[in-house]
Amino acid sequence: MPLFLVNARDKAGSSDLRLANRQSHLQWASEYSHQIAMAGPVLSDDGETMIGSTFVIEFDTLDEARAWAADDPYAKAGLFDRTEIIPFLWLIGEGPKNG
């Protein structure tokens, strides 16, 4: 199954919105744990403040990955300033290998 990289960056000054929706986001993501190769928050330069989310996830098509990302409680709450969803080929590291 193809992999897709989902990079989402929060709107500036939206830490409270992120925290208010974090539990819903984590629960939603856990429902897809069988498809998630890697996921976690993106941190600011201080190494502590969450400023976005990144996933490597398996779907059959780019359209399915886009629909999945749009269903994220963070996305529905308007947290993200921008989201990039692109095909991804995992070649190095302990993750799944394609190709």
Image: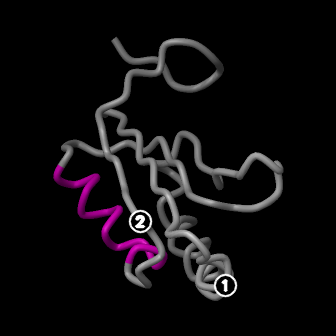
The image shows a total of numbered marks equal to 2
Q: From the viewer's perspective, is residue 16 above or below residue 59?
A: below
Q: Which three-letter amino acid code belongs to the residue tagged 1? A: Asp
Amino acid of disc 2: Asp
Classify the position of the N terminus by image quarter: top left
Name the residue: 40% across, 73% down. 75
Q: Main secondary structure of the magenta part?
A: helix
Question: Quick one: quadrant of the C terminus?
Answer: top left
Q: Which mark is residue 99?
A: none
Q: Is residue 49 above or below residue 92?
A: below
The residue depicted at 51 percent of the width and 25 percent of the height is: 96
Q: Compare marks 2 and 1 and give the one earlier in the sequence.
A: 1
Q: Determine the secondary structure under disc 2.
A: strand
| Horizontal arrangement in the rendering, residue 65 relative to residue 58 (left or right) | left
Q: Which mark is residue 16?
A: 1
**Looking at the rendered structure, which numbered label has been put on residue 81?**
2
Residue 66 lies in the magenta-colored region: yes
Residue 23: x and y, percent?
65, 81
Residue pushed farthest bottom? Answer: 20
Whether residue 85 is in magenta: the answer is no
**Residue that appears at 63% across and 17% down:** 93
Badge 1: residue crowd in 10 Å (few <14, some 14–19, many ≥20) = few
Residue at the image point whose x is 16% and y is 52% from the top: 63
| Magenta highlight range | 63-75
Q: Secondary structure beneath disc 1?
A: helix
CB under 8 Å between callouts 2 and 1?
no
Residue 67, position in %: x, y? Answer: 24, 63
Report how far apart the C-alphas of labels 2 and 1 lie in the structure: 15 Å
Horizontally, residue 46 falls left or right of residue 28, namely right
Among the 4 quarters of the image, the one containing residue 13: bottom right
